[in-house]
């Protein structure tokens, strides 16, 4: 009998806390419950001699079952991620030593899905620990998995190596999840193609698009292909949901999110009891099914793009199941659970059943720590913009507030000869955006016969001015920085001059990437320049030309260390913040740095990089502008970046993330996110 002293102490604390009297209903401590459940997994099932988990808790049934080992590792990873407790980390490393020994010397197996569960868990172990042994083992198994795709039934991965005629949902959904995650980790586009190929085969073959059900398998027989539509299990629903969420994150294609919601709704409506509890799917293998569903269901609940009404419904469902299991289905003396979450277990309990319970409790703890709880109102959930904030290939975004709305003016990112127009976007809240098409193009700007890009915008005396670069001017060519004007923010804009405002290289600065800065003394300056040089000029009153700067010069070079292009300036607490882009715009290392000065003319001493790629989210984050919510100290970076899945140098998308400062006024590193920003309505 394993020592349950520590678990009993934790349990006593939970029970005392739950029974305490207070004016308000006491909140369930899901983290403590998860810790109790996950520690009990080790204490009840861990085989210390062989460094793996027994199949039952009684100490008599010590046989080795391969596929639950992966889910036991997943639970330990959940607990370690939540607590940082070395107790779990020790068992994670011991698991890696013991499981392959019991499995015949490695992680390969006759069942394809059994290997897939293990590579999913080991990839997580690699990401949490950084230990290459997990990745090395994962890559070996992944090669073996891919070798068992065949054209029978139109494609799909086999369930069993010796049976090429059967293809199961359980051998394809997990593989799509893993392939998508491996792509995010390694950036091997072959893995992305595998994720898409596997997912779409399962979707076309085993997904009931009308109801959201995932049929268990398809088999080639003498009478033709037969789909088993009678077997519908929660774990197949879960892995289809998980794969859909992974691919939605990578592609931003809404069909994946719609699929995930449809599969979830089927599960909640058809695979539950009348009182909203997931049905028992038996013991043995079936004991694990619900836990696998819960894992990927939780991933969907946390997603920023899930509609608030669905988030409310799904949270209430999960917490109802967790509360029911804890209150009604837990043998708290032995810390064991039954396959039906409203009934306490009797006798020995399979490892698979405990794993499902642990996954549910860890999910409740994760959601609780993120601020979620049962009974939240729809209005309690924040609405996120998501990144990118609007569809389409758009770069070099310039943000400004006009007429109590946010406006973004980006470059239409396309091959050079096609980049001959501008669109803009407006929003009342930073979340929902309206597109205004073709506000100006080369038919209006007669001297612009090639690409136009990098807008700069300003309002003055009721007129809206739109500056732009055109023709990528080189010495002896017509092109440079143009200016247009309109009576409303969405145009149409008319060419103001009929020729470039600046059409020459001065101080080595290519005439592109202009930023219009309105100083506190009323002056309007234009910072501009490519080719690693930046100039500042002073605009005249009607923006038809330039006039001498305070030092008497017409052009003043203000190039800071590392500057490449894309200048931006703003004032905060009396200081001038000068920002710019570094690196090559077509590459992953495009980034933003900044300097602080007491004057718009510098000197500008580089402070550091504040916006750059996150290999898990996106690359090439740069050419930004800065939004300060009027009347507040809230700042946002509006920038373009490259999706992880991009294969074209022109594939750039517009995103928004929060920009914050430390107590000394230094800009903190900007976290680039998929969720974007929350609703910000202008006062």
Image: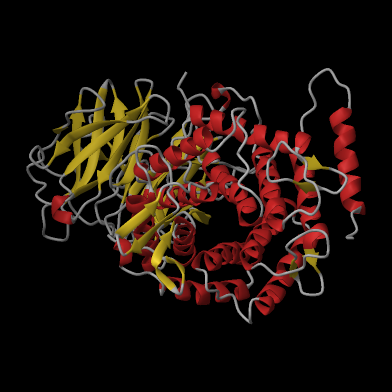
Query: On the rendered structure, is 394 left or right of 354?
Result: left
In the image, residue 491 above or below residue 197 = above
Residue 554 on image: x %, y %:
28, 46
Residue shown at 23% from the left, 23% from the top: 488
User: Residue 287 or 553: which is nearer the viewer?
Assistant: 287
Q: How many marks?
A: 0
In the image, residue 220 above or below residue 228 = below
User: Is residue 509 among what the camera can see?
Assistant: yes
Residue 415 on image: x %, y %:
19, 55
In the image, residue 483 above or below residue 234 = above
Query: On the rendered structure, is 406 left or right of 279?
Result: left
Q: How is the image coloured?
A: secondary structure
Q: Quadrant of residue 256?
A: top left
User: Is residue 633 among what the camera can see?
Assistant: no
User: Residue 494 or 60: which is nearer the viewer?
Assistant: 60
Residue shown at 71% from the left, 57% from the top: 351
Residue 252 on image: x %, y %:
37, 46
Residue shown at 70% from the left, 70% from the top: 64
Q: Quadrant of residue 485?
A: top left
User: Residue 70 or 617: which is nearer the viewer?
Assistant: 70
Query: On the rendered structure, is 140 left or right of 501?
Result: right
Q: Locate the N terminus by quadrant.
A: bottom right
Query: On the rendered structure, is 91 left or right of 307?
Result: right
Residue lying furthest front: 223
User: Residue 60 or 421: which is nearer the viewer?
Assistant: 60
Residue 616 on image: x %, y %:
49, 57
């Amino acid at each position: 009998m394993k020592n349950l002293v520590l678990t009993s102490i934790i349990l006593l604390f939970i029970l005392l806390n739950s029974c305490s009297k207070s004016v308000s209903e006491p909140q369930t401590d899901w983290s403590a419950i998860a810790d109790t459940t996950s520690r009990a997994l080790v204490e009840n099932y861990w085989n210390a001699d062989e460094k793996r988990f027994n199949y039952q808790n009684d100490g008599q049934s010590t046989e080795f079952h391969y596929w639950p080992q992966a889910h036991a590792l997943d639970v330990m990873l959940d607990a370690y991620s939540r607590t940082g407790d070395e107790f779990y980390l020790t068992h994670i490393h011991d698991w890696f030593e013991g499981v392959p020994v019991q499995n015949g010397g490695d992680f390969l197996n006759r069942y394809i899905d059994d290997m897939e569960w293990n590579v999913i868990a080991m990839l997580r172990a690699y990401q949490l620990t950084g230990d290459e042994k997990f990745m090395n083992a994962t890559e070996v198994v992944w090669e073996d998995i891919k070798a068992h795709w065949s054209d029978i039934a139109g494609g799909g991965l086999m369930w069993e190596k010796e049976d090429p005629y059967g293809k199961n949902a359980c051998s394809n959904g997990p593989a799509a999840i893993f392939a998508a995650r491996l792509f995010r980790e390694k950036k091997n586009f072959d893995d992305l193609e595998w994720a898409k190929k596997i997912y779409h085969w399962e979707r076309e073959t085993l997904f009931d698009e009308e109801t959201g059900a995932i049929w268990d398998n398809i088999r080639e027989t003498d009478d033709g292909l037969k789909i088993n539509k009678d077997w519908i299990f929660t774990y197949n629903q879960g892995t289809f949901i998980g794969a859909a969420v992974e691919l939605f994150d990578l592609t931003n294609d809404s069909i994946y999110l719609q699929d995930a919601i449809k599969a979830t709704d089927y599960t909640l409506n058809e695979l539950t009891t009348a009182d909203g509890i997931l049905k028992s799917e038996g013991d043995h293998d079936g004991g694990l099914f619900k836990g696998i569903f819960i894992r990927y269901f939780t991933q969907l609940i946390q997603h920023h793009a899930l509609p608030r009404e669905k988030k409310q419904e799904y949270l209430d469902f999960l917490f109802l199941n967790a509360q029911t299991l804890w209150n009604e289905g837990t043998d708290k003396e032995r810390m064991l659970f039954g396959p039906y979450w409203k009934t306490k277990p009797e006798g020995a309990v399979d490892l698979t059943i405990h794993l499902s319970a642990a996954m549910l409790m860890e999910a409740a703890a994760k959601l609780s720590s993120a601020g979620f709880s049962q009974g939240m109102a729809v209005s309690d959930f924040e609405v996120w913009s998501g990144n990118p904030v609007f569809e389409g290939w758009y770069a070099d975004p310039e943000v400004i507030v006009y007429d109590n709305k946010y406006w973004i003016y980006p470059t239409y990112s396309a091959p050079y000869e096609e980049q001959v127009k501008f669109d803009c976007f407006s929003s009342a809240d930073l979340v929902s955006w309206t597109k205004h098409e073709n506000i100006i193009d080369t038919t209006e700007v007669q001297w612009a016969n090639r690409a136009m890009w990098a807008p700069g915008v300003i309002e003055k005396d009721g007129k809206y001015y739109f500056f732009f670069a055109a023709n990528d001017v080189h010495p002896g060519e017509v092109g440079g920085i143009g200016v247009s004007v309109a009576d409303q923010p969405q145009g149409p804009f008319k060419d103001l001059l009929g020729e470039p405002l600046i059409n020459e290289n001065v101080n080595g600065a290519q005439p592109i990437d202009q930023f219009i800065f309105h100083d506190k003394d009323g002056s309007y300056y234009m910072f501009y320049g490519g080719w690693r040089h930046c100039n500042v000029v002073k605009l005249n009153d009607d923006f038809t030309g330039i006039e001498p700067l305070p030092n008497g010069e017409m052009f003043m070079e203000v190039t800071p260390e590392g500057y490449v292009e894309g200048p931006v300036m703003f004032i905060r607490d009396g200081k001038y913040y000068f920002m710019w882009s570094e690196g090559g715009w077509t590459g992953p290392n495009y980034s933003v740095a900044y300097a602080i000065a007491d004057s718009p003319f510098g000197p500008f001493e580089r402070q550091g990089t504040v916006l750059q790629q996150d290999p898990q989210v996106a690359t090439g984050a740069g050419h930004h502008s800065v939004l300060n919510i009027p009347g507040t100290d809230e700042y946002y970076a509006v920038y373009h970046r490259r999706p992880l899945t991009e294969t074209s140098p022109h594939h750039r998308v517009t995103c928004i993330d929060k920009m914050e400062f430390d107590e000394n006024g230094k800009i903190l590193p900007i976290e680039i996110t998929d969720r974007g920003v929350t609703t910000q309505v202008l006062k």
